[in-house]
Image (cartoon, rainbow, N blue to C red):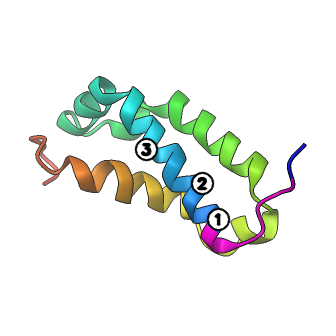
Amino acid sequence: MAALIDTPEAANRLARAIASDLSLYNEAKIKEGIENDSFFSVLQDEIAEGRAHYESRVDAKIRGTTNFFDRALVDVILARKGHIKSKIW
C-alpha cells in the first residue's frame, strides 16, 4: 500500500486529477447539472466516489487544513464550464 500523501501540494494535485477525471467521464451529467442548477445532486455518486478516493490517499492532517477536493470541483469543473447556459450565471 502506498504511503499517504502528506504535503498540501501533492494533495491539491490529486484533488485536481480526480476532478479532471470526473469532468472527462461525466460531460453530459455536468452539462445537465449546470443547466438545471442540480450539479451536486446529479453527480452525487461520482463526487462521493471521488471524495472517498481522495480521503483514502491523503493524510487526515492535510485534509483538515484546506479543502482541496471541493476547491478542485469548482476550479476544474465548474469554472471551466462557464459557456454552458445556466440560471446561476
Which span is picked out in magenta? 3-9
Q: Is residue 48 left or right of residue 37?
A: right
Neighbour tally class for label 3: few under 14, some 14-19, many 20 plus, Cα within 10 Å: some
Could you tell me the amino acid type at mark 3?
Ser
Neighbour tally class for label 1: few under 14, some 14-19, many 20 plus, Cα within 10 Å: few
Using the image, tell me which numbered label, if any, was put on residue 36: none
Give the overall secondary structure of the magenta segment: loop
Residue 42 in sight here: no
Mark 3: which secondary structure? Answer: helix
Could you tell me the amino acid type at mark 2?
Leu
Image position, residue 47 (x, y; %):
52, 38
Give the labeled residue for mark 2.
Answer: 14
Determine which quarter of the picture holds residue 9: bottom right
Identity of the residue drawn at 24% across and 28% down: 32
Considering every residue shown, the one lying at the far front of the view is 2
C-beta proximity under 8 Å, tags 2 and 3: no
Q: Is 22 in front, or is 47?
A: 22
Identity of the residue drawn at 27% across and 24% down: 28
Mark 2: which secondary structure? Answer: helix
Identity of the residue drawn at 68% across and 41% down: 53
Neighbour tally class for label 2: few under 14, some 14-19, many 20 plus, Cα within 10 Å: many
